[in-house]
Image (cartoon, rainbow, N blue to C red):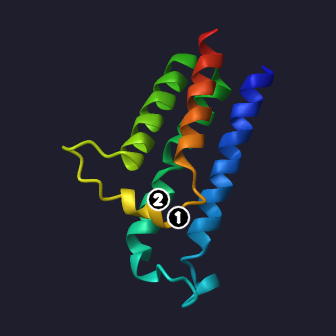
Amino acid sequence: MEKLIIHLAGLIQFAGQVGASTRMYSAYNQGAHENEQFAPDDICFLSDTLVNFEHLGECLHNGDHQRAMYLCDDTALKFQKYIDPPAHFNGRGTPTFQRNQSVNLAVAIKHLEGIKACLTK
């Protein structure tokens, strides 16, 4: 259980990184962000990293470990495609994470894999 908490805490930290990066494109920081021209795409791809977390949390809450493990795999695969896009993948989201390096997809993948490992025991 302790390892699961560590990995869930890591995903909460990741969500905070995404939130902070997304906020930099908002009216809060209007005109001060050097990547403002990329705001529509970057906001889309940054927020896209959090979409499965609602479902993952629901599965964990309901004890649906099979679905939670599937979501961990699916989300980690999506993140990996942003890091290292395969030839057939358009790679459109990849520049977002190159511009927003405080959003560490590799660490999030590690925590998703850790959650899955905890659920398989």
Residue at the image position 61 percent from the left and 72 percent from the top: 23
Question: Where on the picture, by quarter, is residue 53?
Answer: top right
Does residue 83 appear in the picture of this structure? yes
Q: Please tell me whether mark 1 sits on a helix, a strand or a loop.
A: loop
Please state which amino acid type lies under the numbered disc 1. Asn
Please state which amino acid type lies under the numbered disc 2. Phe
Foreground pick, 86 / 53: 86
Q: Position of residue 82 (x, y in %)?
A: 39, 49
Q: Please tell me whether mark 2 sits on a helix, a strand or a loop.
A: helix
Residue at the image position 58 percent from the left and 84 percent from the top: 27
Q: Where 18 falls versus 108 (above or below)? A: below
Q: Position of residue 88 (x, y in %)?
A: 19, 43
Residue at the image position 50 percent from the left and 83 percent from the top: 34
Tag 2 near tag 1, CB within 8 Å: yes
Work out which residue is located at the far bottom of the displayed protein and give it: 31
Work out which residue is located at the far top of the displayed protein and give it: 121
Name the residue beneath numbered marker 2. Answer: 97
- In the image, 16: left or right of 26? right
Q: Position of residue 3 (x, y in %)?
A: 75, 24
Question: Where on the picture, by quarter, is residue 94?
Answer: bottom left
Dot 1: within a 10 Å radius of its alpha carbon, few (fewer than 14), some, or many (20 or more) residues? some
Dot 2: within a 10 Å radius of its alpha carbon, few (fewer than 14), some, or many (20 or more) residues? some
- In the image, 8: left or right of 48? right
Q: How many marks?
A: 2
Question: Where on the picture, by quarter, is residue 26?
Answer: bottom right
Q: Where 46 falls versus 89 (above or below)? A: below
Name the residue beneath numbered marker 1. Answer: 100
Q: Quadrant of the N terminus?
A: top right
Q: Position of residue 38 (x, y in %)?
A: 40, 75
Q: Quadrant of the C terminus?
A: top right
Work out which residue is located at the far left of the displayed protein and give it: 88
